[in-house]
Image (spheres, coloured by chain):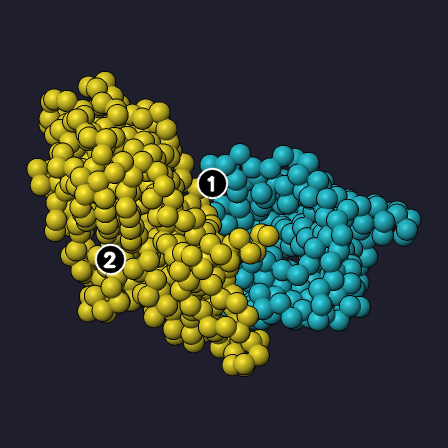
Chain colours: A yellow, B cyan
Amino acid sequence: MSADTNKFVIPIGPQHPALKEPANFEFWVDGETVTGASVRLGYVHRGIEKGAEARTWVQNLYLMERICGICSHVHATAYTLGVEKLAGVEAPPRAQAIRQIMGELERIHSHMLWLGVAAHEGGFDSLFMYSWRDRETVMDLLEKISGNKVHYSANLLGGVKFDITPELAAEIHKGLEFLDERNRFYLKVVNQDETFIGRPRGIGTMTAERANFLGAIGPTARASGVAHDIRVDAPYLKYSEFPIKVETHTSGDLHGRFIVRINETFESIRVIREILDHLPPGELTARMPRRIPAGEAISRVEAPRGELLYFVASNGSDKPERVKVRTPSLCNWSTVLSLAIGLKLADMPMLLTGIDPCFSCNDRSVSVKRGTQDSSMWSWEKLRHYGIEYYR
Amino acid sequence: MNLSLHPILVLLIFPGGLFLLASGLIYQWADRKLIARFQNRVGPRFIQPLADTVKLLAKEEIIPTGVHKGLFLVLPVIALAAALTAGLYVPMFGFQPASSFRGDLIVALYALSVLTLTMGLAGANTISRFSLIGATRTLTQLFSYEAPFLLTLLGPAIAAGTWQISKINDYAGQNIWLMIAQPIGFAVSLIGLMGKLELPPFDAPEAETEIVAGAMTEYSGRGYALFRLGKDVELVIGLTLVATFYLGGLANPLQFVIKTLALLLVLALLQTAFARLRIDQTVGFWWRAGALLAVVQLIAILLGRYFTTVF
């Protein structure tokens, strides 16, 4: 019972079985019905943007990849695209195609991971276990290409590290065959299992207007019929030569998000096959200067969770002046908070997972709250001073 | 089969006490292992439930602030005692029940419900918000499955013309399996047992992704171990009851093992096949489908008895 408002508040987080990463949600409930919601983020702020300013352009490549453990490649891609734009260098076509393959493989593994987590939140552990078992296939493919399952480090400034040989391509084809078949099965489960449909159908329904108003992006918005996808709207890499189809759904509820994500997996599988069959020949890397000319660049890519935006500023040295990252999870929080009201407490874990949140990616700034003081933004100097005082 | 033992042995070793606790742990292991295999996991080792229990018993029991201390400590004991008491009236391991009198079916069912009631009370006793919601859900669920479950166990009792478990056991052994004669009752009783044990998909009272461990959130150490043991014992007794009533009775230990394990296999399959129901869905399910089917079955039995006696 919170003292001031006399409301019954259910806290979820920072430590809670439903959350795999720390964040704090408070749901005000009346019986089982949610009457209000609030979120508090920032538990996993790591100061990466500041850290980037102290590292060289090449070192930052590895740092950026570590912003997210699931969509690591897409962060590095967005960063390299920005830096390459500043340097006026374009990666060779083969390198771009390989980047796109890695990105789409990553999307498959991210969406299958989400399917498992969402099923688990809904109490359907069998689907969770099965989808994660099958997800190993795509992770093994990534390992075969790069030697790593999570942080592939495929990108270089001006190209990629790993080539895809015909033998490797054959193996990827084989793996995709299996994934295609399994995802068809999951689509059937999601569409036909009556006890399962009872949980997501009609929950968190969002019209296209509302999605736009709340600034929703990625599969969350596409499930509401907003046909917005950076891969189509502003093609990067080889997306203009090997285009994808934007998957949308009209229902706008959680069930629609399941369908959109599974359909996107099929689309990724299709486009990877197409690229593998028409892989452009040529070099893997272009020459890149050590110092990047002064200037500013914005690069946008479509991460598995939605639009990922990088702002890179250079002052002509071998270190960036500023790197700003805006991750998709941050844009979707408002949809969770506004849709929560009126739903049941039991729907909350699924609603939270519905946007496929990635907490450690989106913790970009710190707001310090002390006692009864209002929360306020602190400057770097003040924060540094506070840290020194705190550990004195 | 009949077995006459000294009353002290009956209470401490067989069928009460040690035997029930051991079988509870074994059935918990079998349940977990089966589910794990269905879900393509490896599952726990045979010794795991015992290891869990020993570990919990060895741990410090934290008494949170804001609880009634006496109630907090005594509720787990009552829960386990109630479950063990119910074990005296069922044909455990295929032997005649240790204690038997007219109407012991009601006593056994009541003892099993006490376990759920104590869990609800234990949750309501704390000031933890997860526990309070969990307790509300536990008790809500109790009111939804209890009536249909009771009705389905009354079906065989009416068919046998007695409310004494040992006599129903004899009747079930001599006649056609009641699973075939009363299929609806069998299905509802099996699903009712899942509701009673809060197994998936009826695990909303302890849905970990929503309310951590539900009513049990504040329990640690000994209290939690006792509640868990109580649940394991309830699983064995519930399986024994359903097997006695619907699977042609339990005449010897071999039948007991085969029939209860077959039931457990079905339970494990059902647990893996479905997603968790929301508490409102659970209540709706039981009152719209469960209770209605149980009543239909009961009316069918009564009509059947009426016509067989008239003609």
Q: Is residue A216 left or right of residue B300?
A: left
Q: Amino acid at mark 1?
A: Gln
Question: How packed is label 2: few (under 14 Cα within 10 Å), some, or many (20 or more)?
Answer: many
**Disc 2: which residue:** A217
Q: Residue at (15%, 57%) from the top-left corner?
A: A227
Q: Residue at (31%, 26%) from the top-left corner?
A: A146
Q: Amino acid at mark 2?
A: Ile
| Residue nearest the observer in this picture, A23 or A48 | A48
Q: How many marks?
A: 2
Question: How packed is label 1: few (under 14 Cα within 10 Å), some, or many (20 or more)?
Answer: many
Q: Is residue B110 left or right of residue A125?
A: right
| On screen, residue A362 above or below B72 | above
Q: Chain of mark 2?
A: A
| Residue nearest the observer in this picture, B177 or A210 | A210
Measure how far apart labels 2 and 1 are at the Cα level. 34 Å
Q: Secondary structure at mark 2?
A: loop
Residue A173 picture quarter: top left
Which quadrant is home to the N terminus of chain A? bottom right
